[in-house]
Image (cartoon, grey):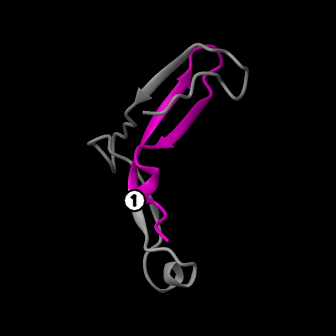
């Protein structure tokens, strides 16, 4: 679990944590992902590739939204 507790934009501590991302079209399950490229390019960079679901943290005061990978260790594997 991420410990994001202060807005990077306005420094408020009023953060709504760990929200699922929703999309009315392409991703109706609310499970957006971030991925590291697999294949030849990734091998040249010494990475195996991987993916992780994203979670959102939203500032109640200004609306700034930060996205975090649930499993960042799955994104880069040397």
Residue where numbered disc 1 is placed: 51
Residue displayed at 60% across by 23% down: 63
Q: Residue 57 colored magenta? A: yes
**Compared with residue 53, is residue 35 higher up or lower down, i.e. above or below?**
below
Residue displayed at 47% across by 71% down: 37
**Circle 1 sits in a helix, a strand or a loop, which is it?**
strand
Please provide percent x and percent y for residue 17.
46, 24
Residue displayed at 41% across by 29% down: 19
Q: Residue 65 colored magenta? A: yes
* 2 relative position to 28: left or right: right
Please provide percent x and percent y for residue 55.
43, 37
**Compared with residue 30, is residue 63 higher up or lower down, i.e. above or below?**
above
Q: Residues within 10 Å of mark 1 (few under 14, many from 20)?
A: some
**Compared with residue 21, is residue 72 higher up or lower down, i.e. above or below?**
below
Please provide percent x and percent y for residue 6.
64, 22
Extreme residue toward the left, this view: 29
Please provide percent x and percent y for residue 57.
51, 29
């Amino acid at each position: 679990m991420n410990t994001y507790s202060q807005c990077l934009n306005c420094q408020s501590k009023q953060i709504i944590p760990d929200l699922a991302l929703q999309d009315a079209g392409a991703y109706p399950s609310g499970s957006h992902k971030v991925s590291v490229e697999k294949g030849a390019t990734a091998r040249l960079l010494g990475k195996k590739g991987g993916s992780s679901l994203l979670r959102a943290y939203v500032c109640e005061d200004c609306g700034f939204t930060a996205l975090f990978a649930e499993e960042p260790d799955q994104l880069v594997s040397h």
